[in-house]
Image (cartoon, rainbow, N blue to C red):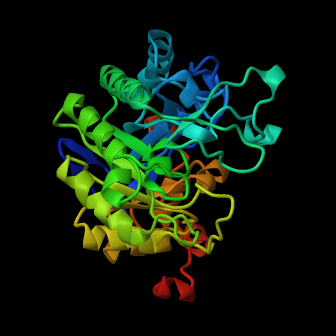
Amino acid sequence: MSSKLFSPFTMRGMTIDNCTVVSPMCEYSAIDGNAQDWHLMHLGQFATGGFGLVIAEAAAVEPRGRISPQDLGLWCDENEEALGRVMRFCREFGQAKMGIQLAHAGRKASCNRPWEGRHVLQADQNPWQTISSAANPHDVGWHTPKMMDRGDMDAVKAAFVAATERSDRLGFDMIEVHSAHGYLFHEFLSPIANTRNDEYGGPINNRMRFPLEVFAAMREVWPESKPMGLRLSTTDWVDNGWSPEESVIYAEKLKALGCDYICASSGGVSEQQRIELGEGYQVKFAEKIRKEADIPTMAVGMIYDPHHAESVVANGQADMVALARGLLFDPHWAVRAAAALGVEANSPPQYERAYGFRFLRDKEREWARPRPTEAAE
């Protein structure tokens, strides 16, 4: 039995063994931006878990770009050295290709961790001045960001370029630029956050200008043989916000600059959003961008069932499927999904005894039995 989900996929000089992707997942467990043992465990289990690609969590390109004080960073030599330890393990024992998401939180920075309430840091918690496309706070009670001037833009662009060069030295196979979920680049794209009246605000070409400038600068220093993609909030889920149609335009501009794929996510720029949740609720956005912008896409968002994931790739809705929360529940999802689909996923020799009964798959097939509604998704 063949599987599109568990077939190789190539972007530039990188070929992944299969089209299952571990999505970047913030762990809020770094110290001064430095990866810890937790990161080695977290990424190491996925690197050895049968997935085609593992993308490390959002790494802030400068200290003020962190969501929380405990965010991973890649702005200094110490950050690079700490992450290098994690990468050495993943390279020695893992089968997956390794990527990293580079990010800046913009006006959503300077907050507590999710399990601490995600409230903005108070005066006695060492908050920092946030920056954004305009001086509009994310919501009532949030920090008021500084509207970025040309100097701020140049500094942020230089930070992204430097983090790109560090990512290459660390041996990452690809980079994903974070342009989603209400963080800095999304804050430039969305008219909800971006109320500027200069050449970086107003019409879509102006709102796209800064994210495109940064992407182009990153692509220039990133090796030609290595892919670079971008995660995009395809819609704000708010009236008069960023739209799927604008996302297609953005994807076309990015493609012209050398972008290799779009990960189609959504939301995050406004607390007024009304998201239409459901299994695979964002797949339609990946399909729209793939077809209308003619660029490979990655589907993400409440994808759990292997047969559903298989249908997304087999039906041409996306080229890759990324999972996140479901993998925190089941880090061995890829191996179980392969068994359910009647194929095999790569696994380290240390675990071969556990997968020695691969052909006794009745349980896995029952676990992953397709539901009638999936044909309509």
Looking at the image, which residue is at 42% across and 51% down? 231
- Horizontal side of residue 112 vs 108, given as left or right: right
Kindly tell me whether residue 95 is visible in this rendering. Answer: no
Kindly tell me whether residue 93 is visible in this rendering. Answer: yes
Residue 270 is situated, as x and y percent measured from the top left of the image, at 63, 58
Q: In the rendered view, would you say 187 is above or below 88?
A: below
Looking at the image, which residue is at 39% across and 42% down? 177
Looking at the image, which residue is at 24% across and 31% down? 222
Q: Nearer the viewer, residue 239 or 296?
A: 239
Q: In the rendered view, would you say 105 is above or below 294?
A: above
Residue 133 is situated, as x and y percent measured from the top left of the image, at 49, 43
Residue 157 is situated, as x and y percent measured from the top left of the image, at 36, 30
- Horizontal side of residue 41 vs 179, given as left or right: right
Residue 185 is situated, as x and y percent measured from the top left of the image, at 45, 45
- Horizontal side of residue 248 vs 361, given as left or right: left
Q: Quarter-wise, where is residue 274 in the image? A: bottom right
Q: Nearer the viewer, residue 238 or 95?
A: 238
Number of marks in the rendered image: 0
* Residue at the limit of the structure toward the front, as seen here: 197
Q: Quadrant of the N terminus?
A: bottom left
